[in-house]
Image: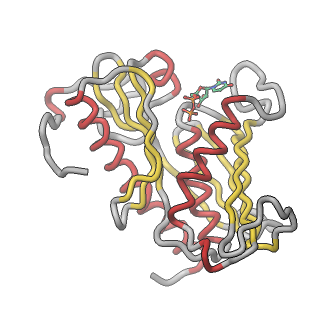
């Protein structure tokens, strides 16, 4: 990732968004760690009107021989939308979209976890979207990282996720549902802010290369803000620095 400011935006060039945000503003964010009694680790994330729960089980012994890795743990993830989470009732059960999001979430978290510390084991992550308003895959990854930390699973860093994109001709941070649906492009990323490693990058729609760089810079900025809130949530749960 270059730190070039080529094509950077300044506030005076930009217009307010439908929800009143500036181009480089996140929706209101709330993160809480340790919200479920029976999981090994858990977290709750609200960003705008998204409400997402993550629960972690493990590391625990894996009995499925064909999945087992003798020298490391595997990380499995299930992303699920509640029937009442979206405007038109979501039919229960997995669909193409939730299978894809489950897969990319596991891939986004994998590089952060010291899987080699837990041979022959599994770490299972369950993400439940209770209410959706655009950007649930990012909210899910953000919640899952906090739940992994809450479970005491050693990690290189907590992965933070945020999208940027283009809506109404403007490159913006953290698309709302309306901006996601009506907008020109969506660029969700996940990263380890400590090292700068990007662990997920997807893109939907069209951006010029300058716009792509602006969007990537905004998404990275968003991840950094979210990362601070993740650390704060763990601090609030366990105290100390
Ligand atoms: N959405 C919906 N019904 C669905 C799937 C998605 O209403 O079955 C909405 C929901 O608000 C979601 C948004 O569309 O957040 C954008 O969905 P996308 O597939 O881009 O994933 P996300 O942005 O949530 O990661």
> Residue, x 38% and y 36% (percent of image)?
164
Q: How is the image coloured?
A: secondary structure
The answer to whether residue 54 is seen in the rendering is yes
Quadrant of the rendered image containing residue 18: top left
Q: Quadrant of ligand 1?
A: top right
Q: Residue furthest bottom?
A: 240
Q: How many marks?
A: 0
In the foreground, 47 or 162: 162
Question: In the picture, which quadrant includes the C terminus?
Answer: bottom left
Q: Where is residue 104? Give x, y as percent.
A: 58, 45
Residue at coordinates 79% horizontally, 30% vertically from top-left? Answer: 83
Residue at image position (30%, 39%) is: 24
Q: Of all residues shown, which one is farthest toward the right? A: 63
Name the foreground residue: 131 vs 208: 208
User: In the rendered image of this protein, does residue 160 appear above or below residue 8?
Assistant: below
Whether residue 39 sits left or right of residue 1 in the image: it is right
Taking 155 as reference, is 217 left or right?
A: left
Relative image position of residue 191 (x, y in whole percent): 42, 55
Q: Quadrant of residue 162?
A: top left
Q: Residue at x 59, y 48 (%)?
A: 105
Residue 116 appears in which quarter of the rendering?
Answer: bottom right
User: In the depicted view, which residue is nearer to us: 63 or 44?
Assistant: 63
Left or right: 184 as drawn, with respect to 90 = left
List x then y, in percent, for residue 130: 71, 40
Q: Is residue 162 visible?
A: no
């Amino acid at each position: 990732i270059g730190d070039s400011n080529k094509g950077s935006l300044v506030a005076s060039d930009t217009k307010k968004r439908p929800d009143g945000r500036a181009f480089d503003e996140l929706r209101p964010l709330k993160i809480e760690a340790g919200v479920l009694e029976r999981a090994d680790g858990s977290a709750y994330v609200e960003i705008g009107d998204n409400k997402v729960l993550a629960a972690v089980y493990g590391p625990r012994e894996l009995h499925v021989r064909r999945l087992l890795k003798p020298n490391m743990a595997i990380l499995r993830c299930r992303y699920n939308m509640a029937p009442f989470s979206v405007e038109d009732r979501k039919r229960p059960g997995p669909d193409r979209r939730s299978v894809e999001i489950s897969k990319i979430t596991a891939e986004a978290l994998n590089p952060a976890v010291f899987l080699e510390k837990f041979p022959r084991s599994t770490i299972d992550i369950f993400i439940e979207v209770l209410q959706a308003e655009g950007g649930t895959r990012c909210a899910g990854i953000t919640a899952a990282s906090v739940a992994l930390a809450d479970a005491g699973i050693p990690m290189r860093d907590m992965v933070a996720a945020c999208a940027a994109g283009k809506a109404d001709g403007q490159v913006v941070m953290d698309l709302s549902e309306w901006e996601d649906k009506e907008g020109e492009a969506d660029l969700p990323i996940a990263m380890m802010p400590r090292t700068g490693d990007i662990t997920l990058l997807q893109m939907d729609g069209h951006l010029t290369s300058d716009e792509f760089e602006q969007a990537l810079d905004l998404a990275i900025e968003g991840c950094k803000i979210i990362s601070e809130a993740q650390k704060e949530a763990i601090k609030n749960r366990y105290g100390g620095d």
